[in-house]
C-alpha cells in the first residue's frame, strides 16, 4: 500500500508568480483534501475533491484552485502569490465522499516560501 | 477560524509520565479525531471517537468525549521521547471537512 506523496518538498517563489503543487493519493482512496498550515498554527481547509469534482471549499480566494485526475491524484494551483501564502501545504486522501468517520491520510507537505 | 481549541498550547514532561491535553469545540459534531505531527511533517491519524461514544482506547492513548461540554481530552500514558510532537484535535461537523485546532506541543524529556 503506497502512502500519500507530495511534490516538490520545498519551493521558493516570488510574489506575483504562480505555483502548482502535486499530490498522489493513497491507493484505493477517492477523495483528496488540501490544507494550508502556517507556522505555529493548525491546518486550514482549502478545498476537497471527490471523483474529480470540488466537493467543498474553505475560506480561500479564487486564486487558489485545484484539480483531481481520474487516477485520484491532485494538483493545487495558486496564482498571484502573496507573502502570506508562505506555508506548509498538506494534501490528505481518504475513502468515500468526505471525512465522515474516515480518517485522513496526509502527505509530508510542500513547504512554500514566497519572497 | 478554527473549530477546535487545544489546551495547553505547550507541555513539557519527563519520560514515563502521563501527558493530558484538552480540546474544546463550538458546534455539534459527527466525530472528533486526534492527529500527531512531528516537526514540519505530515499529520498522522491517532484515534477517532464518534459523537455517541464517551471513551476510547488505543495502545497508550485514551480519548474521552463530552458532547454536553463540547470537549475532548487525549491522555498519553507512560510517555516516551518518540511522543515528542504536536497534537491536534479535528472535528467533523458533517460539512465535508475536518476543522483543526492550533495544537498542543508536547516535549518529552529523557
Image (cartoon, coloured by chain):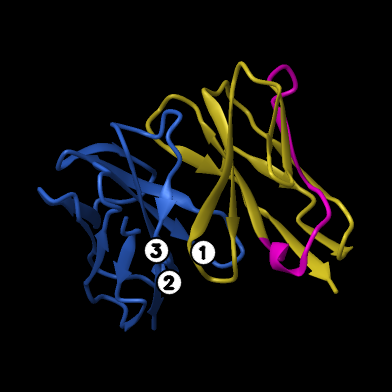
- Mark 3, residue position: A89
Q: Is residue B102 left or right of residue A93?
A: right
Find out whether the residues at labels 2 and 3 contact each other: C-beta distance under 8 Å: no
Which segment is the magenta one?
B67-85
Query: Could you give the CA–CA distance between mark 2 and mark 3, rounded to whole angstroms?
Result: 9 Å
Query: Could you give the CA–CA distance between mark 1 and mark 3, rounded to whole angstroms?
Result: 9 Å
- Which residue is at the far left? A70
Q: Residue A86 carries which label?
A: 2
Q: Nearer the viewer, mark 1 or mark 3?
A: 3
Does B59 appear in magenta?
Answer: no
Q: In which quarter of the image is the C terminus of chain A?
A: bottom left
Q: How crowded is mark 1: few (under 14 residues within 10 Å), some or many (20 or more)?
A: some
Front residue (pair A79, B67)? B67
Q: Nearer the viewer, mark 2 or mark 3?
A: 3
Q: How crowded is mark 3: few (under 14 residues within 10 Å), some or many (20 or more)?
A: many
Is residue B30 among what the camera can see?
yes
The correct choice, above or below, for B31 with respect to A10 in the image is above
Front residue (pair A48, B48)? B48
In the rendering, at what x and y percent does residue A66 appear?
21, 53
Q: Residue A38 carries which label?
A: 1
Secondary structure beneath dot 1 equals loop
Q: Is residue A60 left or right of residue A73?
A: right
In the rendering, at what x and y percent does residue A49 appear?
24, 42
Q: Do labels 2 and 3 share a chain?
A: yes
Find out whether the residues at labels 1 and 2 contact each other: C-beta distance under 8 Å: yes
The chain shown in blue is which?
A
The correct choice, above or below, for A18 with respect to B42 in the image is below
Amino acid at each position: 500500500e503506497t502512502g500519500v506523496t507530495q511534490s516538490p518538498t520545498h519551493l521558493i517563489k516570488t510574489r506575483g508568480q504562480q505555483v502548482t503543487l502535486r499530490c498522489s493519493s493513497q491507493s484505493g482512496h477517492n477523495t483528496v483534501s488540501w490544507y494550508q498550515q502556517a507556522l505555529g498554527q493548525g491546518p486550514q481547509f482549502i478545498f476537497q475533491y471527490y471523483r474529480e469534482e470540488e466537493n467543498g471549499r474553505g475560506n480561500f480566494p479564487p486564486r487558489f484552485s485545484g484539480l483531481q485526475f481520474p487516477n485520484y491524484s491532485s494538483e493545487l494551483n495558486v496564482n498571484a502569490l502573496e507573502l502570506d501564502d508562505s506555508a506548509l501545504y498538506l494534501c490528505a486522501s481518504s475513502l468515500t465522499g468526505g471525512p465522515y468517520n474516515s480518517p485522513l491520510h496526509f502527505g509530508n507537505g510542500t513547504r512554500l516560501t514566497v519572497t | 477560524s478554527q473549530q477546535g481549541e487545544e489546551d495547553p498550547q505547550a507541555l513539557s514532561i519527563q519520560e514515563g509520565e502521563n501527558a493530558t491535553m484538552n480540546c474544546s469545540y463550538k458546534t455539534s459534531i459527527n466525530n472528533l479525531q486526534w492527529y500527531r505531527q512531528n516537526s514540519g511533517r505530515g499529520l498522522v491519524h491517532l484515534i477517532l471517537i464518534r459523537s455517541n461514544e464517551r471513551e476510547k482506547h488505543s495502545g497508550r492513548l485514551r480519548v474521552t468525549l463530552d458532547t454536553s461540554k463540547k470537549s475532548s481530552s487525549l491522555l498519553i500514558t507512560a510517555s516516551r521521547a518518540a511522543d515528542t510532537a504536536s497534537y491536534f484535535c479535528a472535528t467533523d461537523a458533517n460539512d465535508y471537512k475536518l476543522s483543526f485546532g492550533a495544537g498542543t506541543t508536547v516535549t518529552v524529556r529523557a
